[in-house]
Amino acid sequence: MTACSNNSSNNENAEKAEPQNVEETANEALNPVYDDTADPMLQLDAALRQAGEEGKYVIAQVGGNWCPWCLRFADFITKDDEINDIVTEAFVYVHINAYSVDEAGKRVLNDDVMARLGNPMRFGYPVLVVLDAQGNILHTQDSGMLEEGNGYNHEIVKRFFELWQPKAMPN
């Protein structure tokens, strides 16, 4: 697994092997996708409201701009037209910061939103949480299972999104 670590013991090898910020990732020019000023709980509430109005599910990509694999995943699904079409049609996609920065400049876990999402950080980052419009967690996806080499596998990522979209789920 090469996803960014959450500093838990089950991800120690990933932490040592993977740079922890974009500047350390050679030759990558990836755009930040997480709003460091946003309240992640309000972001999630807004995504759930939108999903209800549009008959979609929510995909919460949990991580941060400090995680190169989080930025790679966001870049991958944006640039892959087939996957982007599936995501746009079936999901409200939201980037949820796993951490905030406190007054001392220290990164602290956003405990409330992590609890609401089923504490997915045990999988490392990014981690994808699929929710229905009522906020029920349907699935938590370890993104390491979607990887291939230094990126993501088109067919595996496409299958993930196809299997967890509303029209694939029983009523």
Image: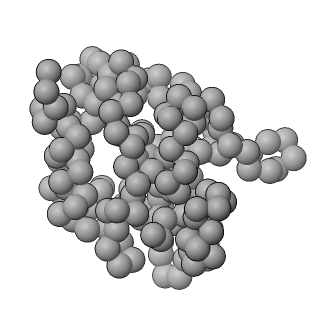
Q: Quadrant of residue 19?
A: bottom right
Residue at 27%, 17% in the rendered image: 53
In the figure, 96 relative to 133: above or below?
below
Q: Is residue 133 left or right of residue 11?
A: left
* Residue furthest bottom as drawn: 26
Residue 15 is situated, as x and y percent measured from the top left of the image, at 61, 70
Residue 40 is situated, as x and y percent measured from the top left of the image, at 56, 33
In the figure, 96 relative to 156: above or below?
above
Nearer the observer, 123 or 88: 123
In the figure, 56 relative to 28: above or below?
above
Residue at 22%, 61% in the rendered image: 156
* Residue furthest right as drawn: 104
Q: Is residue 35 visible?
A: no
Number of numbered discs on residues: 0
Nearer the observer, 65 or 18: 18
Residue 110 is situated, as x and y percent measured from the top left of the image, at 65, 38
In the rendered image, which quarter contains the C terminus? top left
In the figure, 161 relative to 49: above or below?
below
Q: Is residue 69 visible?
A: yes
Residue 92 is situated, as x and y percent measured from the top left of the image, at 32, 34
Residue at 16%, 46% in the rendered image: 162
Nearer the observer, 29 or 169: 169
